[in-house]
Image (cartoon, rainbow, N blue to C red):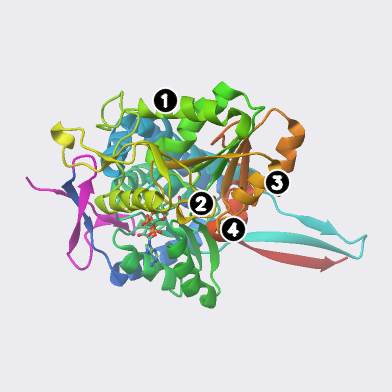
Amino acid sequence: MRLLKIQNYIGGSLVAPNSGKYLDNINPAIGEVYSQIPDSDRHDIEQAQQAAEKAKESWAKTPKNKRSEIMMRIADLIDQNLEELAKAESIDNGKPLKLAKAVDIPRASSNMRFFATGILHYSNESHDMDGIAINYTLRKPIGVVGCISPWNLPLYLFTWKIAPALASGNCVVAKPSEVTPMTAYLFSKLCIEAGLPAGVLNIVHGLGSKVGASITSHPKIKAISFTGGTATGKHIASVAAPMFKKLSLELGGKNPNIIFADCDFEKALKTTMHSSFANQGQICLCGSRIFVQRPIYDKFKTAFVDKVSKLKVGNPMDSDSNLGAVVSKEHQEKVMSYVALAQEEGGTILTGGVTVNPGGINEKGYFIRPTVIEGLSFDCRTNQEEIFGPVVTIMPFDTEEEVLTYANSTEYGLAATVWTQDVGKATRMGANLESGIVWVNCWLVRDLRTPFGGVKNSGVGREGGFNAFNFFTESTNVCIAL
Ligand code: TXE
């Protein structure tokens, strides 16, 4: 059977890679190649950058409401194509179809609408100097920017990056993950249908080490917005910083989920099921370290393990599957290596800790049972390193000071969750947790206007709301003597 060959989107057209070479794209739920993606290289990036350069002046001059209209048309087309996009996302990533339909794709159109409308309210500052002079600050688009996105929430994070860049008048050279390219390819067809002018958005598929690296190092791509692993982020920074490029890095996390004895027990239990295992635990915001105050530790642990052991791991297309496949064979092996490490470090597996063979067409897929591990020290490798799979650790604590030490002990600082009904405790934790985001009595409740990003090795800069527009524009302060 002839495999679908994905194409690059450069200068408004769908084109083959210059090399004529392609890479296999695997469906992780069946463990087989189901399509091919361009094995692009720096020549394709050069063409994309030139197409963006050619389009940048007219796009920057396009009135905001016109840019907004085109982006809203793209959002409408995403909604109209929800079924096809959700199925493509589930096949490419391994996540349950119902999750792609409920979260990934609706959020992609929300991202487009949020920034398409946000730009209409993004205003300039002015500073009056008591009649001596008046200052006003212009915010101009940077020009040509690079957006590099990961495989865990493919279209969701791809649009989260490109939407503010486009809305603020930039042209984009974008690279989705080579592991999950399909929805970005389908998205490029929607951009053509919506009438996005040629060269405004260019999507080049291929390997991070070739295509991603070409974007990062291209002298005429003036800003890089990246989401992915901390190690890769570090490398990108080492290339881009000496070139004085603006950098937005959304990296890994090892997020604490802190459950005090005075919590709303049922709500904490129910939400912890999601914050532990949503998207097979492949969300940088997942709470992978669970700390439970001692008076309720045994009760919570028993109830949690019981619920986790009943989760269904299976065909992502089945509506009763709670977890689908993890994204690749390599990732399955990486996650399982941490299960082995946890046992070496003295951990006890309370449930899971094994791969799953759902049988049938999923015989060769990459599945892992949701796993809960107890008995580890807070500072062992399993509790310090990002696993990024359906694996959580659980341990008791007694005091606020103790759990803060545990929570803040890693090199990461992206998101934390706190369960308490005591507002003083909640505010003290919010103030003292080394984290970009703290959710109290909830998880993944997202207002897109809020600053989004991490501290320490979880990243640099903030996405979201006007923070995103500030990143994708340069300011000029004009001071006029009166
Ligand atoms: O990320 P990578 P991967 C974490 C998670 C995961 C690890 C690696 O722990 O196991 O990162 O995942 C492109 N120059 N997160 O392999 O390698 C690459 O092609 C420029 C957390 O997905 O960082 C892809 O498009 N680009 C994260 C993107 O970078 C390069 C979500 C991400 O790939 C490049 C995903 C290079 N040298 C993984 N090398 C989160 N914070 O949500 C790769 N890329």
Q: Distance from label 4 to label 1 (Cα)?
A: 43 Å
Q: Is residue 10 magenta?
A: yes
Residue 322 belongs to magenta span: no
Local SS, label 3: helix
C-alpha gap between disc 1 and disc 2: 25 Å
Tag 4 or tag 2, which sits nearer the N-term? 2
Q: Nearer the viewer, mark 2 or mark 3?
A: 3
Can you tell me whether the CB of the residue at mark 2 lies under 8 Å from the nearest atom of ligand 1?
Answer: yes
**Residue type indicated by callout 1:** Lys
Toward the viewer: 61 or 143? 143
Q: Quadrant of the N terminus?
A: top left
User: Disc 1 vs disc 3: which is toward the camera?
Assistant: 3
Labels 2 and 4 touching (C-beta < 8 A): no
- Visible residue check, residue 73: no
Question: Crowding at label 1, few (<14), some or many (≥20) Cα neighbours within 10 Å?
Answer: few
Q: Is residue 363 above or below residue 26?
A: above
Residue at label 4?
471
Identify the mark nearer the N-term, 1 or 2.
Answer: 2
Q: Amino acid at mark 3?
A: Glu
Instruction: Please report the residue visible at 46 percent of the width from the left and 37 percent of the height from the top.
Output: 276
Q: Nearer the viewer, mark 2 or mark 4?
A: 2
Q: Dot 3, how many residues are within 10 Å of its Cα: few (below 14), some (14-19), or many (20+)?
A: few
Q: Point out the tag, 4 or 1, that comes first from the N-terminus.
A: 1
Q: Which residues are magenta?
A: 1-30
Report crowding for label 2: few under 14, some 14 to 19, many 20 or more residues within 10 A (C-alpha): many
**Disc 2 designates what residue?**
253
Q: Secondary structure at mark 1?
A: helix
Sequence-first tag of 1 and 3 = 1
SS at mark 4? Answer: helix
Residue 182: percent from left, percent from top: 28, 46
Tell me the tag on residue 307: 1
Label number found at residue 401: 3
